[in-house]
Image (cartoon, rainbow, N blue to C red):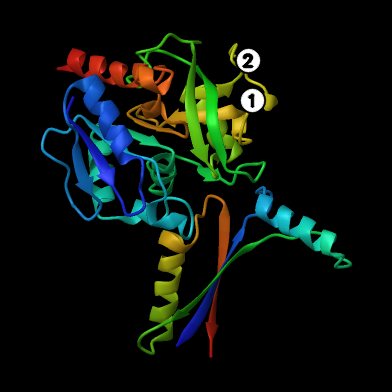
Amino acid sequence: MKARVTVTLKSGILDPQGKAIEGALKSLGVDGVASVRQGKVFDIELAGSDRAKAEAALKEAADRLLANTVIENYAVEMKG
Amino acid sequence: MKSAVLVFPGINRERDMARALKLISGKEPAMVWHAETSLPEGTDLVVVPGGFSYGDYLRCGAIAARAPIMDAVRDYAGKGGLVLGVCNGFQILCESGLLPGVLMRNAGLKFICHDVHLRVERSDTPFTRGYNAGQVIRVPVAHGEGNYEADEETIKRLEGEGRVLYRYCSPEGAVDERHNINGAAQSIAGIVNDGGNVLGMMPHPENHVEDIMGCTDGRGLFAGLVQHLEKAA
């Protein structure tokens, strides 16, 4: 089983890196970019085939390490 | 003062810290490897030094905060033991839940490495009793992620309970946006937990403790801790 965990900054949290990327895109002349927020993607392979167990493990992984829930949100997406 | 300095892979300021502790307390600190599960018997002070633990992977301090030794540090702090985190150590303490909030990327996006002035907000704590309230000290900073942020309620609580011990300021002690080097909320440079026994700060007091360093303003922090422990003993 495969899964993807996406970690993004909560809205309202200042994202200076996103702002810098936004500025770079504008200076490249990429049209129509209004704003950029950056985040992280984790592609995780899971041992076993118990989907519920896998989802619980991924949630634990995100809560305990992958995201800092003070400033970040996360989403877990099972693949296949 | 029996101190223990934690050592994580990628930490690089542990020897400066150990040297300062030995110089001021007269006792060689124990260097404690991150994979240990207990602190040396009779530890008076745990220090989480600066550096780049785990190469700042994931988030600064995130991986070190989950190291085996941190459970022992949490127990120790829970019983009122003194813990000092400097720079990456502050980030590790926030990530481990021992301190609230988070250290974000500097508002100006640049790594900042120079001396700064700090205003000591109060002198009646173990971490500041070597100074006078309102005193301005000069110490270096060296960080890319030192912009302290927390939700509004947490900031209000920190301020209301007098838990901001050090603030970035001008050489005269004025706290304003111009001297808030990294954009931190309320110009926060250092805070304590609700028990008052865990301090996290971005600047490096251990790097201003000897005449050869050009300044000895950092000594007061360590001397104050030694005094506090002597009085308690």
Measured as percent of width and height from the top left, residue B92 is found at: 40, 46
Residue drawn at (30%, 55%) of the image: B67
Query: In this rendering, is residue B98 above or below B128?
Result: below
In the image, taking residue A11 as reference, residue B6 lies left or right, namely left
Residues at discs 1 and 2 both on one chain: yes
State whether residue B198 appears in this view: yes
Figure quadrant of the N terminus of chain A: bottom left
Q: Say which element carries label 2.
A: loop
Residue type indicated by callout 2: Ala
In the image, taking residue A61 as reference, residue B148 lies left or right, namely right
* Disc on the earlier residue, 1 or 2: 2
Residue that protrudes farthest toward the front in the picture: B212
In the image, taking residue B102 as reference, residue B23 lies left or right, namely left
Determine which residue is flagged by label 2: B174
Distance CA(mark 1)–CA(mark 2): 8 Å
Residue type indicated by callout 1: His
Determine which residue is flagged by label 1: B179
For residue A37, which numbered disc appears in the image? none
Residue neighbourhood size for the residue with mark 1, other residues' Cα within 10 Å, grouped as few (<14), some (14–19), many (≥20): some
Residue drawn at (52%, 82%) of the image: A78
State whether residue B165 appears in this view: no
- Asked if labels 2 and 1 touch by Cβ distance under 8 angstroms, the answer is yes
Query: In this rendering, is residue B30 above or below B221?
Result: below
